[in-house]
Image (cartoon, rainbow, N blue to C red):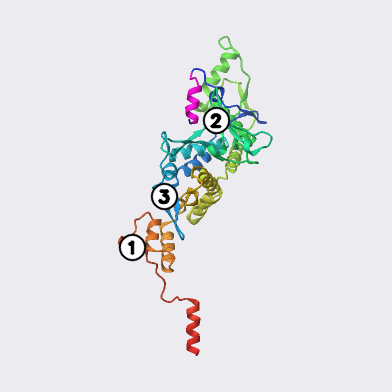
């Protein structure tokens, strides 16, 4: 029985458990409560999680079969291939499952799914909300380690082999850290800056001022006069209007405009700090200041995103899925591996020059080049031939020819 089935059995929609009503917030020094749902309201956090999760979800994840004496081929005839490449469970495609799991991993710190056996001998992967998961172990005995799942009014335990788990960051084998909770002060500061900006704009771009020299007549009171000023000059729709007062009335502004108070600079700083949590290049979240935006510079930045941001997580997923989804005997011949070719492809001229070098030097065939361009092989095996330059020869053969001539 999957987590979803257990949860539906034990949860009443009229009285949902507290974990479904809200996630507990953590107080910060900025005076703002922080939790994962609030953090997703920050555009930088949202963009980082969305970009990483979409890339993980969109990359093909085939299962390969090892060939003897070397090489590999896609194991399209296996249930594991269908599970990881096509459909994870009856309600989710493989792409949908990977996206949701990656969002959980990079928001709550853990992407976890239960491995559920099917009647036909296959398996399904069912995501478990990470805020419902804790761990237990008795007397430091590794054999007693369990994942404890809170399914509403019931709890149940799962063995490590019954789940696939992808922690975002951990300091030991059995626990994980939420990036939002770990960096709650950084997130709290960003939320406070956003709240400050929203309140500033709702009350007018400039700070409040003092009106002096007002002579309240019979028709005006202090409250009615303030209401008239608010109606005419407060809010974004009235910003920069010329203020007209009776003779002798003066308006004196108090404080500095947000620009002078480095409000925008603070926003940029918090954006950089949030991106640093996810090791996200700023140009990926549409922050182009200080980054190269032409030619090979942008390509190198994109390659850096793949190498330093995506690749460590992809390796983690590959190893966990190969170990947990593919049974012990099958692991001798089968393994899961993401295809990065689509992301690593450069400009067409650069690719063709690289293919030309590989073909002329004999380490690429026509069919191998066509495969990298998503083209079918040439018929009758014509593209499998490897070519070598006529002016190149084996070093031992060349040495022997010199000796023969001298003799």
Q: Which residue is mark 1?
A: 381
Q: Nearer the viewer, residue 369 or 333?
A: 333
Label 3 sits on residue: 75
Position of 130 with respect to 29 (left or right) is: left
Q: Are marks 1 and 3 in contact (CB under 8 Å)?
A: no
User: Residue 275 appears in which quarter of the rendering?
Assistant: top right
Distance between the alpha carbons at the discs numbered 1 and 3: 21 Å
Which of the 4 quarters of the picture holds residue 158?
top right
Name above or below for residue 119 compared with residue 10.
Answer: below
**Does any portion of residue 236 appear in the rendered image?**
yes
Query: What segment carries the magenta color?
Result: 2-13
Q: Is residue 226 magenta?
A: no
Residue lying at the far top in this picture: please name it. Answer: 218
Majority secondary structure of the magenta segment?
helix
Which secondary structure lies at badge 1?
Answer: helix
Residue 37 circle label:
2
Q: Position of residue 306 (x, y in %)?
A: 51, 50
Residue 237, numbered circle: none
**Residue drawn at (39%, 47%), measured in percent from left and top?**
77
């Amino acid at each position: 029985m999957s987590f979803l089935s257990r949860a539906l059995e034990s949860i009443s929609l009229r009285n949902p458990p507290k974990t479904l009503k809200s996630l507990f917030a953590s107080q910060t020094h900025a005076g703002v409560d922080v939790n994962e749902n609030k953090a997703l309201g920050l555009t930088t956090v949202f963009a980082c999680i969305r970009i990483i999760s979409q890339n993980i979800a969109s990359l093909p994840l085939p299962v390969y079969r090892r060939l003897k004496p070397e090489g590999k081929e896609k194991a399209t005839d296996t249930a594991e291939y269908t599970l990881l490449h096509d459909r994870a469970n009856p309600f989710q495609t493989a792409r949908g499952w990977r996206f949701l799991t990656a969002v959980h991993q990079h928001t709550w710190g853990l992407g976890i799914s239960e491995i559920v056996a099917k009647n036909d001998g296959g398996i399904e992967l069912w995501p478990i909300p990470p805020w419902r998961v804790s761990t237990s172990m008795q007397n430091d005995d590794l054999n007693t380690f369990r994942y404890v799942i809170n399914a509403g009014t019931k709890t149940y335990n799962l063995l490590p082999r019954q789940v696939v788990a992808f922690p975002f960051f951990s300091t030991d084998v059995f626990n994980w850290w939420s990036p939002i909770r770990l960096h709650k002060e950084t997130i709290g500061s960003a939320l406070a800056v956003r709240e400050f900006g929203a309140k500033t704009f709702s009350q007018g771009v400039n700070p409040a001022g003092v009106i002096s020299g007002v002579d309240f007549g019979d028709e005006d009171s202090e409250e009615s006069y303030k209401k008239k000023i608010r109606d005419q000059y407060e809010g974004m729709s009235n910003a920069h209007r010329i203020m007209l007062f009776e003779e002798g009335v003066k308006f004196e502004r108090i404080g500095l405009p947000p620009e002078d108070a480095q409000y925008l600079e603070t926003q940029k700083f918090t954006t950089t700090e949030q991106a640093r949590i996810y090791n996200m290049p700023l140009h990926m979240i549409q922050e182009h200041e200080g980054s190269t935006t032409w030619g090979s510079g942008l390509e190198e930045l994109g390659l850096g995103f793949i190498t330093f941001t995506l690749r460590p997580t992809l390796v983690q997923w590959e190893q966990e899925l190969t170990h947990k989804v593919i049974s012990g005997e099958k692991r001798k011949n089968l393994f899961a591996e993401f295809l990065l070719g689509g992301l690593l492809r450069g400009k067409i001229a650069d690719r063709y020059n690289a293919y030309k070098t590989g073909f002329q030097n004999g380490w690429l065939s026509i069919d191998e080049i066509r495969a990298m361009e998503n083209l079918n092989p040439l018929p009758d095996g014509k593209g499998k031939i490897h070519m070598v330059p006529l002016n190149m020869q084996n070093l031992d053969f060349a040495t022997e020819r010199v000796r023969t001539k001298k003799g």
